[in-house]
Amino acid sequence: MASITRRPATAKRRASAEAEILAATHRLLTAGSSFTELGVQRIADEAGVARSTFYMHFPDKSALLVRLASTTLTTSFGITSAWRPADGLEALEAVFTQVVAYYREQSAVLLAIHEVATYDTTVREFWRGQLALFTDSTIAVLREEQAVGDADAAVDADLAGRLVVVGGERAILDHIGLQDERRDAAFVRELASTWWYGVYRRPSDARAAAPE
């Protein structure tokens, strides 16, 4: 019986230590530390745990960053995925307003991901995989719209889906890097309009009207 009662306490301590490590890394990144130059010992010291405890939870820093990225993407994609074309353009603007605000809160983590992804295969493949999941979801929604005649059948759903998801994610990251929150409303309006008029409600005669 004793071993059974100890297990929940052990699991709770492990979860607490992991949360402290993640929170400590987030604090250090937000304070301006470069993830590449951030050592395991520094993270452990900030979290108030032993170096060995770090390795009990994460085999290396890449695994740590993936975990941070997973939480960030789950939240941001969850916000965006809640929108459906039937909700309209104004609702899409409201969604992107939330996403931009959240990206600003998580900017240090997002910049670290893009930094490390340039040289770390594990982080790069994870990030691409997560973006692919959201891209596939966006493509599916667009095809549903095309099937009922609400979206132009001439739109290449695969290409358009990748363009708005991958391009939109990069555009948001680039925008928040400028650190000018006064332009957030205008940015959100343009991003939402690009999705709405460029993909979901593109005029069916847009190609014919385009100049030669």
Image (cartoon, rainbow, N blue to C red):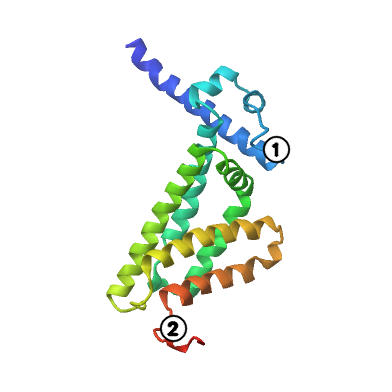
**Mark 2 lies on residue:** 207
Looking at the image, residue 89 sits to the left or right of residue 112; the answer is left
Looking at the image, residue 136 sits to the left or right of residue 74; the answer is left
Total tally of numbered discs in the picture: 2
Q: Amino acid at mark 1?
A: Ser
Image coordinates of residue 76 in percent, x first then y, are 50, 53
Image coordinates of residue 4 in percent, x first then y, are 34, 16
Q: Would you place residue 55 above or below residue 160 in this image?
A: above
| Mark 1, other Cα within 10 Å: few <14 / some 14–19 / many ≥20 | some
The residue sitting at the left extreme is: 147
Numbered disc 2: secondary structure:
helix
Closest to the camera, between mark 1 and mark 2, is: 2
**Mark 1 lies on residue:** 33
| Measured Cα–Cα span from mark 1 to mark 2 | 48 Å
Q: Would you place residue 199 above or below residue 138 in this image?
A: below
Numbered disc 1: secondary structure:
loop
| Residue 83 visible from this viewpoint | no
Q: Amino acid at mark 2?
A: Arg
Q: Quadrant of residue 98?
A: bottom right
Image coordinates of residue 89 in percent, x first then y, are 48, 74
